[in-house]
Amino acid sequence: MIDTIIAVMQNTITPLLTALVLALLGMLFAWLGKKYHLEVKQADQDYLEGLATRAIAYAEEEGAEFLKAHGSRLPSESKLGEAITFLLRTAPKLDQLQARDLISGMLGKVKGAGATGNEAVGN
């Protein structure tokens, strides 16, 4: 008798309760995301990555112009600052840290920029 009850619980009740709890958790996370505007759409992320790529290209151009004008390379921190400034002008809702993180994350994906140079990764 006890074996039958355990078997029913393992084969029927436990899966149903698990499904119910997961569904409730999904609804809770969806509600929290909507309430606190936590949803990041893939299109928005792609747009920001495109802006970051343009910011990196802009900073590289600034570095090339600096090299022509002064005969020395623009320091990496200065180029990063140029890219962050460009990104913040084009995406004003980002803060300084978000812009820095986005640009730093995209550096390895942009060919010819950053420490990877001509070795773009992740494309």
Image (spheres, rainbow, N blue to C red):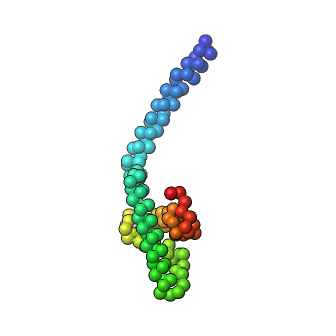
The spot of residue 26 in percent (x, y) is 44, 39
The spot of residue 79 in percent (x, y) is 49, 75
The spot of residue 46 in percent (x, y) is 41, 57
In the image, residue 113 above or below residue 36: below
Q: Residue at x 45, y 70 (%)?
A: 57
In the image, residue 54 above or below residue 3: below
Depth check: give the residue in front, 62 or 9. 62
Depth check: give the residue in front, 9 or 87. 87
Q: Residue at x 54, y 79 (%)?
A: 75
List the single residue furthest toward the top: 1
Whether residue 82 can be seen here: no
In the image, residue 46 above or below residue 90: above
Q: Residue at x 51, y 66 (%)?
A: 111
Depth check: give the residue in front, 27 or 57. 57
The spot of residue 97 in percent (x, y) is 48, 66
Number of numbered discs overlaid on the protein picture: 0
Q: Quadrant of residue 48?
A: bottom left
List the single residue furthest toward the front: 118
- Direction from residue 8 to residue 32 in the image, left or right: left
- Specify the quadrant that holds the N terminus: top right
Q: Residue at x 55, y 22 (%)?
A: 11
List the single residue furthest toward the bottom: 70
